[in-house]
Amino acid sequence: MTVGGRPTLAADGQTFDVTNPATGQVIAQVPRASAEDVDRAVDAAQSAFEGPWSTLPAVERGRALLRLAAVIRDHAEELAQLESRNIGKPISSARWEIGAAAGVFEFYGGAANKLHGETIPVAKPGLDLTLREPIGVVGLIVPWNFPLMMASWKLGPALAAGNTAILKPASWSPLTALRLGELALEAGIPDGVLNVITGPGGVTGAALAAHPGVGKIAFTGETGTGREILRLAAGTIKKVSLELGGKSPNVVFADADIEKFARESPYSVFDNAGQDCCARSRILVQRSVHEQVVELFPQRGAYVAKPTIDQALDIFEARRLIEPALVARLIETLTPERVARLRQHLELEIEARRRNDKRAIVRLSGEFHTLLAEQAGNGALARTMRELATLTCLIIVLYDAPTVDACLADEHTAIVDAIAHRDLPRAEKLMLDHLDHIKRGLRLEPSTEEVDLEAIFN
């Protein structure tokens, strides 16, 4: 870990294993931070905040971020290899991610001196103005699918605004975050401005969220964990940014260009080995083009299989864990027995995650489940779709034109929906009718064309 500009172990000496999910082999041991370690990180960050960082001219903070971006680019291949081994993503995706992370720091390096206050007109002789000031110490908790890029999304605006940060990566993917802490020092970021601590969310993350010395928590991850962070943060009434939910639908109407849809949609499901909250892992297909989609989609995948659901659950062990594009045969009914079996399998995986049994998790996650097709409006199907959202699988739902609204009404975790339709007014109306579901997953991605001058950390 990096605390106060120095490498450090956990106060009690505890560690935990980090594995390569593609092989199940242990590739590193990292500190298991406790509440005492969180206290040390907060003290270091507060000292750095009270030091030169928060009062440093904004243009100088921006230059520091540009130096960090340059150092990341200098170490791009090292970081990409580390990311690929740590979370099992394809090396091509890892290389893209590292470049994207550097780009985020470059963006906020240029944005740092563009955070302005406002003068508000009031009755004379009054004068009313606003100042943009940093919050102080911020806690940043990032997920495991794009570890370094998600860290950059939070660190970029936080540091540009003059805050100091404590970064806690996911327990499964801490290696690039730990290396980032070292590279920040190499880039000349002052000691204590960027601290990196590692440990389980229920211990390290909870202590960070509840700590009275932390002014803001930013978290990306599962909705239930987000609720717990809100509860913990409420004790000190700290600011909170949550990016929750994930996995969304593609909605295919009968008049869509089915060839084009089938050619492009596999990427939207299986990119980054399927580990993407934006993945559109459910396809809602109108009945008249259902068979055409079923026929064309597997032809565009990198791997095709057509077992029944029972065979899929029994046979698909130790399948490809890197870039899986598995498509199984569709079924027309979802019986209670099949739902029960899917849930049993999910419970095994959940229990393996609780035990942190990496080998069992890899095996269970590698059993890519069948696609499910059923008439819209089935409650059991809606529940199963939500339960399968964390796995690398695809669900195709058959609907008749009047029932698409009912189908979308079950979508409570969607972030990035897509509609394939030639009727633009109809597609727009459908989008607006269900916009509240899409807005639940607030995206805080920097644009190349404009910057939110208020950012999210001031």
Image (cartoon, grey):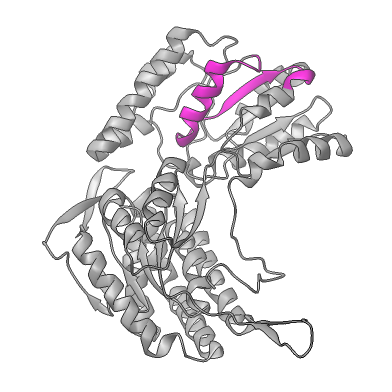
In the image, is residue 1 part of the stretch drawn in magenta? no
User: What percent of the width, then of the height, locates residue 58?
Assistant: 54, 87
Q: Position of residue 245 (x, y in %)?
A: 52, 42
Using the image as rendered, state which of residue 421 and residue 75 is in the foreground.
421
Q: Toward the viewer: 27 or 183?
A: 183
| Span of residues in magenta | 375-403
Q: Quarter holding the N terminus?
A: bottom left
- Rendered residue at 47%/15% (across/down): 309
User: Per the image, is 400 magenta?
Assistant: yes
Choose between 22 and 411: the one closer to the eye. 411
Is residue 296 visible in the rendered image? The answer is no
- Residue extending farthest to the left is 12
Residue at x-position 51% and y-position 23%: 383
**How many numbered circles does the render carry?**
0
What residue is at 76 percent from the left and 30 percent from the top?
A: 258
Residue 24: quadrant of the picture: top left
- Between 48 and 363, the one lying in front of the other is 48
Name the quarter where the C terminus is drawn: bottom right
Is residue 25 among what the camera can see? Answer: yes
Position of residue 421 measured from the top left corner of the image (x, y, whole percent): 81, 34
Position of 241 relative to 249 (above/below): below
Whole-percent x, y for residue 227 in the image? 43, 45
Residue 224 in which image quadrant: top left
**Horizontal side, residue 374 vs residue 126: left or right:** left
